[in-house]
Amino acid sequence: MRTAPRRIAVVGGGPGGLYFAALMKQLDPAHDVTVWERDAPDVTFGFGVVFSDETLGGIENADPEFAAAMASRFARWTDIDIHHRGESHTVGGQGFAAMSRKELLGLLQRRCRDLGVTVHFSTPAPGAEVLRASHDLVVGADGVNSLVRQSFADVFRSTVDRRHNKYMWLGTDRVFEAFQFFIKDTPWGTMQVHGYPYSDSGSTFIVEMHEDVWRRAGFDTAQEFAPGVSDEHAVDRIRELFAEELAGHQVFANNSKWLSFATVRNERWHHGNVVLVGDAAHTAHFSIGSGTKLAMEDSLALAACLHEHGDVETALTAYETERRPVVESTQRAAQASLEWFENIGMYADQEPTRFCFNLLTRSRRITYDNLRTRDPEFADRVDAAFAASQGLESTAPAMFQPFRLGQLELKNRVIVSAMDMYSAVDGVPGDFHLVHLGSKAMGGAGLVMTEMVCVSPEGRITPGCTGLWTDEQRDSWARIVAFAHERSTARIGLQLGHSGRKGSTRLMWEGMDEPLPEGNWDVIGPSPLPYGPGSPVPAEAGREDLARITAEFAAAARRGAEAGFDLLELHCAHGYLLSSFLSPIANQRTDEYGGSLTNRLRFPLEVFDAVRAVWPEERPMIVRISATDWVDGGNTEHDAVEIARAFIAHGANAIDVSTGQVTAGERPAYGRSYQTPFADRIRHEVEGAAVIAVGAIASYDDVNSILLAGRADLCALGRTHLYDPHWTLHAAAEQGYPAEWPVQYRAGSRKPPSARTDAVRPRLSLLRAEPPDRTVHLRWTPHREHSLLA
């Protein structure tokens, strides 16, 4: 679409700002584009910048001339080398390139000059309000400390999450042949180096460590450095500490100081005719790639949207709509990656191959299947290491390796997660539950869990919840258990719970967590605090109430044992009664059942002990917990470790690690496998704890990756099994594993031939620039990137 020439102000002369300016002048030389950069043209910080092949494809489509100039300066590699405890592992199959940041800026500056962009170096930009009034568009490309963003702070509503690791960006004249991870054990803790080549004469050398390690190593000297001045004392220490890794080569500083990574997020990226790009709008940890890459991709998308839409507001809305999901996905991966490196000491004792696999899959973007495609030999080593760690000779897919939970043998490591169906009458499970759980048992999973089975009428969530407070309910459950045992090799587990302050609500599809319009019953909790707006105020549980409820749990457990369940899970998660005692958000008592975590654990542990005393000794008992409340002042992952440790000490065979649902005010960080890091922490910090991961685990590749990395021992999947009750059998067929199908279904056990699908290629729309004989390719939708750096 042809648009009228615009007067454009760009604040910030880094790669994102200069690239956007050049793109706009290519699209229409009549655009009046001015860039303000406060530093001189030859000033740059850092050393190399990394690009994936996907990003380079977009740059080449938009400006082949500039892309060719970049390509002539690239250092390329295809391998990742991981050095840890005297061993080196190489993983191949990469497609990455890097170049000097200084050379990149030089190319962009020349490109802008050739195209007629006005660039003011060593010149602070006029105020954002002034620019906004005098220009059609103002682009804030002025970095993580953006003055443009600060000028409209009330509109952009930014948050800055400053992390726990310290890092320093350095360079070296040692030219690495591939990306390097140096993991170094020191007397003060684990340190790591991210290193990669960017030219035929130098490499980036980023040193990173947890702040606690940094302090113990004596790096926390209270010195202030002027802009552009490096911390030479720290650089000298690094030269000594990493002499082996530098192999006689030099390390160089460039405004190099200890930094704490700041993750920037903004609720909005544009306001009127002002828009943010790159680090001004968002940041992503350097361990998954380059912020320069994100900034230049922003510039591509913004230029395309402005060219396609005549109205600036419409164009900026389109830009944010297009880019935000991509950036947020990248930030989720970056968050997982940076947190992994913050906790790297937790994994230091892992078997070397498993450690490498854990590192490579840390962000959850890279999975076992990705690695097998790139480097089958490395994937074989990972399989063999996992089997050896389990004392098994088979190299079956990890999800199909057996697992012993106490004295209970599970044929594989897949669990059908507990899911409330709200379809009982007076607490009695009926034919629906027989079909629902029976089909899941025949679907190949090693363990099938019931929904939360309530211990009393007052302990129900809704009128449709199942129970075990009567013999009639027990007998109906026995029918379902018998079917599972007779028709499958799956084990079936009972989840036992009490709704607490979240009870007396409507069926989920009638309004989740909304009170019943009539027929309500009184609810109870640790304190008289409602779950959320509109929820009833619970009665504070007294001593007699606690004794009665404990007896109800024990009675229900006896009935569950009589019904033949193989395993019992005590539900101490999701804000139900036992969970609410654990959380300081719901439990504000001042007696021995409130206050400290030790006190908040008291009642859940009393119930656990009472149930364990009546549950058959040979059958395992596990506990589901919420590892974080996802709200300020609530339980955190550190509390979860102590909660898990307490239940394991009382005899729990495993911890089922979920999160949240403790308060309506929670703010979960949703994403693929988003709860797995909590399971990972508990598995590595609580001795003797078998751990179940749950939450947005959607593929068998995810399951295998979690297990192979050592983040959990078992994986529970819920919605996946609602979509496909035979998901586990189908996963076996997809992987060529000979799972045992029900005899009636064996005719369908062979994977049908797949229809041929052509490879997906990037979407390219040709945009006609002005003058008419110039064509610029801007619209580019990349494949989802699976970088081993991610």
Image (cartoon, grey):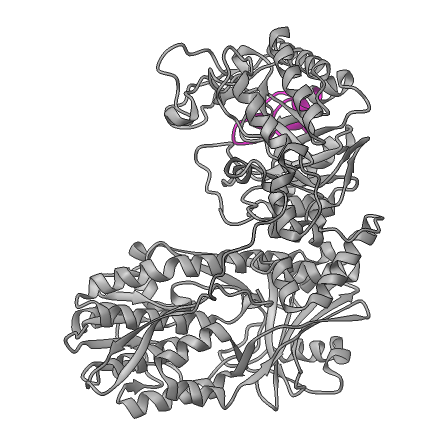
Query: Which residue occupies the foreground of this view, 292 or 75?
Result: 75
- Report the side of 514 relative to 658 (left or right): left
From what the image shows, is residue 446 above or below residue 217? above
| Count of marks, rendered view | 0
Give the camera-side residue of 661 and 748. 748
Q: Quadrant of residue 183?
A: bottom right
Q: Position of residue 437 (x, y in %)?
A: 59, 26
Q: Residue at x 62, y 45 (%)?
A: 678
Above or below 390: residue 8: below
The answer to whether residue 765 of the structure is visible from this angle is yes
Name the foreground residue: 278 vs 432: 432
When asked about the image quadrant of residue 197, the answer is bottom right
Residue occupying the far front of the picture:
747
- Provide residue 555's location: percent of width, then percent of height: 68, 11
- Image quarter in which the N terminus is found: bottom left
Residue 590 drawn in magenta: yes
Which residue shows up at 37% across the image and 62% down it? 323
The foreground one among 689 and 738 is 738
Q: Is residue 643 left or right of residue 524?
A: right
- Which quadrant is the C terminus positioned in? bottom right
Res. 728 visible in picture: no
User: Relative to 517, does residue 296 appear above or below in the rendering?
Assistant: below
The residues colored magenta run 579-606
The verdict on residue 156 being magenta is no
Q: Position of residue 352 (x, y in %)?
A: 78, 62
Q: Is residue 194 left or right of residue 509?
A: right
Residue 182 picture location, percent across and down: 71, 71
Q: Residue at x 72, y 40 (%)?
A: 412
